[in-house]
Image (tube, helix red, strand yellow):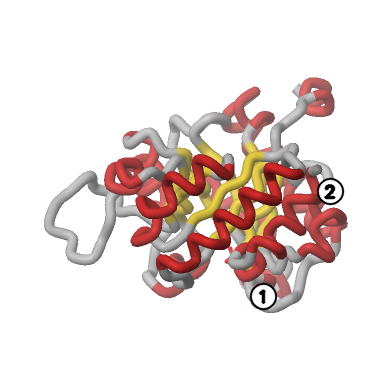
Amino acid sequence: MAGKVATLRIKALVAGNWKMNGLKSARKEVVALGRKLARNKAACDVLICPPATLIAGFREDARTAGVALGGQDCHMQVSGAHTGDISAAMLKDAGARYVIVGHSERRADHGESSAIVRAKAEAAHEAGLIAIICVGETRAERDAGKTLRVISSQLAGSLPLRANAKNTVIAYEPVWAIGTGLTPTTQDVAKVHKAIRARLEKRFGFDGAKMRILYGGSVKPANAAELMAVPNVNGALVGGASLKADDFYGIISAYT
Ligand code: PEP
């Protein structure tokens, strides 16, 4: 298996997580990104996960731009009495191809356990969406030397049995690096991504070798090339720097 991994070419994914930012007027950023991509085609897949309210309205512009759309969370049920929630089928219907599940802000703010994240990922797969499953340690866990243990447990608990390289993407996002301007060293990123790859291969075999593993946490145009060059980093999950087409394109350019 190890020999095969070394020769595998995995198409990278650069995904933007807009979080709770953006009104209809932010459509101009999708259009601007499309213009940049038309001039210089990206050698990676590009995804924007705006607030769910914007997905349907962005659909045509995103299609023209060659950019996929995704949700930032979904409920584990298809429909029902869940006020304020949104199902994976609804996201798909609005034009999403992906959905982020288990982002650390959901795990922390909404008490989402790995079991809940796994149920959400299963719902995403059932609806035909690609689940981006996030894992990552807090600063305290890192300082206590527990990073790999935490990641391993989150992976074991959050990944559905039937996850494969087509329906699942992993995002490693150290919680302390999100929105702080701090990033791990490239050696630290390499160590964690290598450990994630080993666990994916052990559990899913060749599919685990092909599954994309994104790095997320303060990725900016200035550090993207260095981070994206780390072995087993197959793209980025980007928060703040995905809101403006110029910055986001600066990150995507790591792959052009
Ligand atoms: C995120 O929220 O997934 C993220 C990586 O945020 P930022 O890029 O702003 O650190």
Q: Give the residue pinned by disc 2.
A: 230
Element at badge 2? loop
> For the residues carrying marks 2 and 1, which lies nearer the camera in this image?
2
Q: Give the class, few, some or many, for how many residues have Cα within 10 Å of label 2's Cα (few <14, many ≥20).
A: some
Query: Considering only order in the chain, which callout, 1 or 2, is on the residue closer to the N terminus?
Result: 1
Above or below, 200 against 53 in this view is above
**Quadrant of the frame with the C terminus:** top right
Q: Is residue 59 left or right of residue 14?
A: left
User: Which residue occupies the extreme left position in the image?
Assistant: 81
Give the percent coordinates (x, y) of residue 64.
53, 41
Disc 1 target residue: 139
Q: Amino acid at mark 1?
A: Arg
Q: Quadrant of residue 17?
A: bottom right
- Residue at the spot x=65%, y=23% of the render? 206
Q: The residue under label 2 is which amino acid type?
A: Val
* Residue at image point 18% right, 48% down: 79
Q: 57 or 70, which is in the foreground?
A: 57
